[in-house]
Image: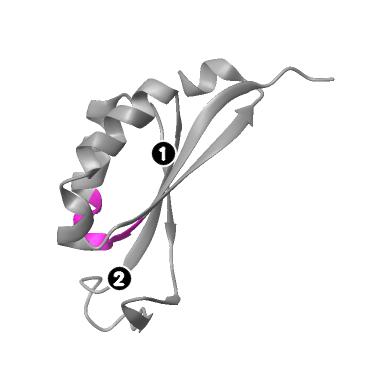
Amino acid sequence: MVATYPRKKIEILVDKPLLRRIRALADEAGASGFTVLPTLAGDGKSGRWDDDQITGGAGSKVIFTTIVSESAANALLTALQPLLDQYSLIVAVTDVGIIRSTKFD
């Protein structure tokens, strides 16, 4: 069996204009890499939304994903705390096992 190494996967649903700030917080927390995925639509407690592409990205949402060590995850989550209510961020944290540990240090 292939050895795996424990890490934390953090996914953040964020309004696209706030992405630069999220990237900076992740960098400061020690996240060495990330992926940003586009979103098309959603529905939740705040209601249904669609990315209409008319507002030039102002109303667009993206998913920011990073895989980090537990200490970097704690640092990023602490940094995100003040933004959660102000910007209605959705944050998910998952325990994952990775194969190439040096890619996520």
Q: Name which of mark 1 and mark 2 comes first in the sequence.
A: 1
Q: Residue at (22%, 44%) from the top-left corner? A: 81
Q: x, y percentage for residue 26?
A: 29, 35
Q: Quadrant of residue 1?
A: top right
Display coloring:
one colour
Measure the C-alpha gap from mark 1 to mark 2.
19 Å
Q: Residue at (55%, 35%) from the top-left corner? A: 95
Q: Secondary structure at mark 2?
A: loop
Residue 40 vertical placement versus 24 (above, below): below
Chain part drawn in magenta: 13-19
Q: Nearer the viewer, residue 47 or 102?
A: 47
Circle 2 is placed at which residue position?
A: 60
Circle 1 is placed at which residue position?
A: 34
Residue 39 vertical placement versus 29 (above, below): below
| Magenta-colored stretch includes residue 14 | yes
Q: x, y percentage for residue 73?
A: 37, 31
Instruction: Name the amino acid type tagged 1.
Output: Phe
Q: Residue at (28%, 58%) from the top-left corner? A: 89
Q: Secondary structure at mark 1?
A: loop
Q: Quadrant of residue 17?
A: bottom left
| Magenta-colored stretch includes residue 64 | no
